[in-house]
Amino acid sequence: MTARQPSGPTSGPPSGPTAVQLAGQVRAGRGTARAATERALARIERHDARLGAFQVVRAAAALREADAVDARPDRAGLPLAGVPIAVKDNVPVAGEPMRAGSAGSDPTPQAADHEIVRRLRAAGAVVVGLTRVPELCVFAATDSGFGLTRNPWNRGRTPGGSSGGSAAAVAAGLVPLAHGNDGMGSIRIPAACCGLVGIKPGLGVVPAGLGGDSWFDMAENGPLATTVADCALMLSVLADRPSLARVADAGTLRIAVSTRAPMPLDPVDRDWASAARASAAVLREAGHSVVDADPPYGQVLSTSGLVRWLAGTALDARTLADRSKLAARTRRHAAAGALLLRAGLPRPRGPQRWRERAERFFAQYDVLITPTLAHPPIAARLWSERGWLANLWASSRYAPFAAPWNVAGWPAMALPAGVAPGGLPLSVQLVGRPGSEATLLALAAQLEQLRPWPRLAPDYR
């Protein structure tokens, strides 16, 4: 059962209002940005010492920004009026350092906002802080020399990576929305680990501008949220497309469901495979055409993704102020990427062939459903102190389903799909053709209605 929704931003149960509700209250004058920001800062102060979600908390600056939102003459028209948000610490936020999880980064405050931060602020959002990431956002667990981030559902598990700080902040109700980005699954993996909704938009829908070269167009900015409506609202602002906030009826879709891992290192966990099949069964009962069908992933796909992951890290490392301070695992990852760059890689042929195969597959289907993860979230530990191969194995084994759609540049999203017997959330991934973000959101909203999920982790509701 979903949590009861309160009547105001500082009333009701601890879970608080959704972003859609909060913005509506502030626009109507039934709440203020300052009150919402004070509430978020109080929850951060209460809970974040145990979670480690935030790299920087902008308490004084956020309250000033909230007051400015309350004073704006156009407040009644702001889509995110007064909504406290967190921004992942790998995009510029004016007045704050951008550390990207690395001691080798420049601690000088950034001179200007990234375009997506500018859009969020223009829409009335209040940036309360910057969230932690693994060094250069490389791996699928969030820890670095700055600290360890834990999963609100089980603090012994990772919240995923690389947007793990953002996911932990939203799942604990520290903020109703957070920014993330996704180069090999870095929105969808944390969303799955933390029981959230997250979408990686298709290529060009939202400005990227990440690191050295956005990992050769694999990386995209996007939202992490507790509801589909909140996810759609934030995506509409990031994309500067208001129509995306109006989630439509899904209609009748042709849906393929697959539980085969793209790179089958070992069998997919039974609970995660069952979650995908159960979601597909619910949609079949709702009138959609649903069949079992495996995408033609092919071996070149794993090579294309790996090459871009390595080479993109090498380019990101070149942006650091002091590369000698890289952790050993990141240094080795970047060094392997540098060798590939010198060899003239990556080349466009691999992704082109994969897109051609995917297009042939999707000629028969509108949406693909898979598990978001192959195994439960890995342990919350200082992975940054372990070896490179141990990190590669851990990340690849538990989270292989996301990367294919980064290589293709196609939209994909994760949403909750029940809770495993051990108490951790389960999740399914929805994938569609380029331009199908609205379709994915509509189908996700239907699943949310048919199989509602808890908005927050149990200890934070």
Image (cartoon, helix red, strand yellow):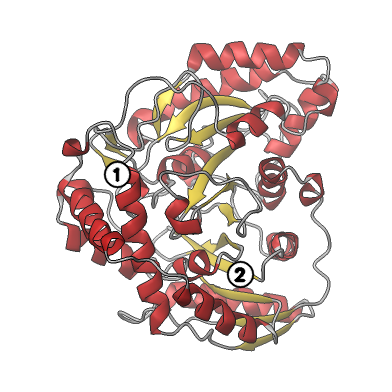
The residues tagged by marks 2 and 1 sit, at their Cα atoms, a distance apart of 31 Å
Q: Is residue 376 visible?
A: no
Question: Which residue is depicted at the point 44% across and 21% down?
Answer: 96
Is residue 224 toward the left or the right of residue 155 in the image? right
Q: Is residue 80 visible?
A: yes
Q: Disc 2 or disc 1, which is closer to the eye?
A: 1
Question: Which residue is depicted at the point 68% across and 34% down?
Answer: 17
Q: Position of residue 65 (x, y in %)?
A: 62, 15
Q: Position of residue 32 (x, y in %)?
A: 72, 18
Upstream in sequence: badge 2 or badge 1: 1
Is residue 378 toward the left or the right of residue 455 in the image? left
Q: Is residue 415 above or below residue 152?
A: below
Q: Which residue is mark 2?
A: 431
The amino acid marked with disc number 2 is Val
Where, by quadrant of the figure, is residue 299 drawn?
Answer: bottom left
Q: Position of residue 107 (x, y in %)?
A: 32, 23
The amino acid marked with disc number 1 is Ala
SS for dot 2 = strand
Q: Which residue is mark 1?
A: 317
Is residue 352 toward the left or the right of residue 100 in the image? right
Q: Quadrant of the C terminus?
A: top right
Q: On residue 139, which mark appears?
A: none
Question: Which residue is depicted at the point 77% across and 47% down?
Answer: 245
* Other residues around mark 1 within 10 Å, as few (<14) / some (14–19) / many (≥20): many
